[in-house]
């Protein structure tokens, strides 16, 4: 049985990865990050080791001590960690960030991934076992997009791709040809809330991959929480075959009950 390591961040992504890896016959050891990783991950892995954000320097050594050479990064770390003086004052993190050009997601996670590879670890694609959870071109809900929503989707894809190229965010909220909100460090859920607060009605959410997406550590993710945050009668368009859809059955069920249309295109 092949042993795989997981650096587990927030949300259900690490849980899904571990579950599917085990179905594929792999044994999983996860390094969980305090304040980020869900406790329930322990039910899906063979071993769980907890560290603090300030202890990231230990990760490569932990995997080597466990005789693990193949590693996946699943789930992001809370971006507000970058502004926590109690964490960022740690000498190891100051040394790391002193060598990073800027603190955009791609820059930080790419530098971290490269450090793991430099230490002799093989970085697996974060979507390795998850293809079936990345919808292809289709309408996933009972309701199809209206003509007006189709126009907003087209505009949203165009704008979101520009955002992604600049590594600002991957989501944009649109209504009747107007850009309500673009995603930055606050994440998709907060972007939705901000857009909904402006119009207090249905919106169109578009989420895409970046033009040069590094799937070693970064993949667009939506799920049940996304649908919960969208106002009734909204529309969500994701890039087909490139967006990970967590808790898909429950999310689509809720979308149908809320009159939300969900479509994968691209």
Image: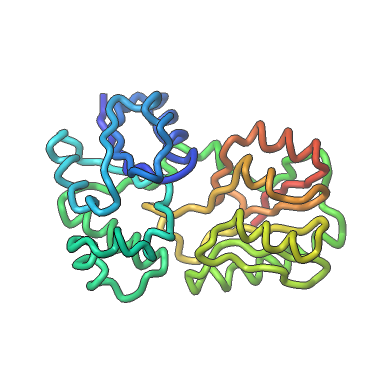
- Residue shown at 43% from the left, 29% from the top: 40
Foreground residue, 65 or 231?
Answer: 231
| Image vertical order of residue 163 relative to residue 248, above or below | below
Q: How is the image coloured?
A: rainbow
Residue 166 is situated, as x and y percent measured from the top left of the image, at 49, 74
- State the count of labels: 0
- Residue shown at 18% from the left, 63% from the top: 91
Locate the N terminus and report the quarter of the image it occupies.
Answer: top left
Locate the C terminus and report the quarter of the image it occupies.
Answer: bottom right
Residue 147 is situated, as x and y percent measured from the top left of the image, at 87, 59
Residue 139 is situated, as x and y percent measured from the top left of the image, at 74, 44
| Image vertical order of residue 211 relative to residue 258, above or below | below
Q: Is residue 218 left or right of residue 52?
A: right
| Image vertical order of residue 46 relative to residue 104, above or below | above
Determine which quarter of the picture holds residue 37: top left
- Residue shown at 51% from the left, 70% from the top: 168
Foreground residue, 89 or 60?
Answer: 89
Residue 164 is situated, as x and y percent measured from the top left of the image, at 53, 68
| Residue at the outermost front position | 86
- Residue shown at 61% from the left, 50% from the top: 240
Q: Is residue 209 left or right of residue 30?
A: right
| Image vertical order of residue 155 relative to residue 47, above or below | below
Q: Is residue 202 left or right of residue 108?
A: right
């Amino acid at each position: 049985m092949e042993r795989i390591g997981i650096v587990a961040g927030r949300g259900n992504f690490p849980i899904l990865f571990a579950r599917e890896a085990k179905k594929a016959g792999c044994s999983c050891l996860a390094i969980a990050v305090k304040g980020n990783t869900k406790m329930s991950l322990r039910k899906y892995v063979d071993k769980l080791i907890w560290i603090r954000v300030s202890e990231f320097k230990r990760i490569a050594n932990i995997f080597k001590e466990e005789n693990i050479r193949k590693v996946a990064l699943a789930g992001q770390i809370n971006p507000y960690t970058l502004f926590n003086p109690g964490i960022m004052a740690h000498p190891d993190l100051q040394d790391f960030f002193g060598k990073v050009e800027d603190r955009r997601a791609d820059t930080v996670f790419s530098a971290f991934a490269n450090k793991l590879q430099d230490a002799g670890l093989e970085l697996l694609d974060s979507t390795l076992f998850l293809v079936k959870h990345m919808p292809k071109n289709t309408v996933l809900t009972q309701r199809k997009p209206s003509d007006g929503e189709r126009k907003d989707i087209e505009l949203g894809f165009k704008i979101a791709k520009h955002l992604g190229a600049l590594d600002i965010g991957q989501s944009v909220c649109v209504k009747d040809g107007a850009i309500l909100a673009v995603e930055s460090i606050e994440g998709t859920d907060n972007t939705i809330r901000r857009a909904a607060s402006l119009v207090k009605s249905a919106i169109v959410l578009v989420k895409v991959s970046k033009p040069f997406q590094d799937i070693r550590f970064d993949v667009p993710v939506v799920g049940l929480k996304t649908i919960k945050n969208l106002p009734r009668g909204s529309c969500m368009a994701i890039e087909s075959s490139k967006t990970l859809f967590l808790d898909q059955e429950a999310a689509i069920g809720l979308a149908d009950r809320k009159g939300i249309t969900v479509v994968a295109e691209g």
